[in-house]
Image: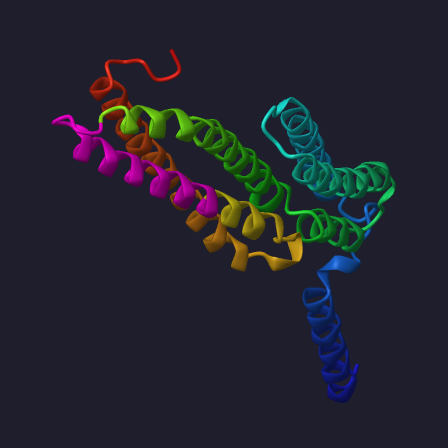
Amino acid sequence: MNAKFLRSGVASAIIGGAISILVPGVTSASEHPHNFLANQKKLETQLADRVSQLNRLTTDISRAKSLTTAHAATLAANVATALTNINALVAKVPTDTTDIQLRADEISMIKKNRVFVVLTPQVFLTIESDNVTAEVTLLQGEESGLLTAVNGLVGQHGYTNALNRYTDFVRLVNRANLEATDVASRVLAQTPADFPHDTGLFASANRALFQVEITLAHANYDAGIIDLASGGNIGG
């Protein structure tokens, strides 16, 4: 065997090895069955987890009493679309025969659906914002009774304070309503394709709803002060 042949053989071996390293995904299940089967099983488990989560979200949506009809329809449609995508992968993954196929299915599972990082916070935050809106509606229904109570204090020592409390009550309730509505609009506008940019929006929305709850607590406090000043006769 001459030197030229040896060099040629070594070069071919190196190039062949490099191609194998650069393109590992071409490996079929028959070449590395244990690794492939483990990856396949892992992906099947991840898909099952997402099916379970989507079913939980569907239940949460159906049981949320304060969700508006429009918001419930939007959330249900988003979840149904993801569930259709995931179930298609549930059927496909067991038929995969290469790592490339598994990797493509994994990417599709994550990027097309974002079950845990987009759909889940979207459902939770929308439900909470609509809960706040429902509470705002109840408080707005108390405004006329509060005003009547305040007017009943005209000429009395506590009138000015009660009037200030009523003005603050109306301001706080209106602010809570606007903020909750804004949260719902921004959250529902997000899609799986927006990730990771929507992560910050969800965090911001969560903080906003927390602040809204504090705002409503202050409004309830104002209503309580007016109630006490009027002798507890509001609505009675």
- Residue farthest left in this picture: 157
**Residue 211 within the segment the image draws in magenta:** no
The answer to which of 44 and 198 lies nearer the viewer is 198
Answer with the quarter of the image where residue 93 lies: top right
The answer to which of 171 and 124 lies nearer the viewer is 171
Q: What colouring method underlies this structural image?
A: rainbow
Q: Point out residue 203 in the picture as x, y percentages from the top left corner.
A: 44, 48
In the picture, measured across the screen, residue 98 lies left or right of residue 124, that is right
- Residue farthest front in this picture: 155
**Residue 161 within the segment the image draws in magenta:** yes
**Residue visible at 74% across and 58% down?**
25
Q: Which residues lie in the magenta part? A: 154-179
Answer with the quarter of the image where residue 50 lies: top right
- Residue farthest top in this picture: 236
Q: Main secondary structure of the magenta part?
A: helix
The answer to which of 68 and 219 lies nearer the viewer is 219
- Residue farthest bottom in this picture: 4
Query: Which quarter of the rendered picture does the N terminus lie within?
Result: bottom right
**Residue visible at 66% across and 39% down?**
71
Q: Point out residue 186 in the picture as x, y percentages from the top left corner.
A: 55, 52
Q: Would you place residue 179 above or below residue 6 in this image?
A: above
Answer with the quarter of the image where residue 175 lies: top left
**Residue visible at 75% across and 46% down?**
32
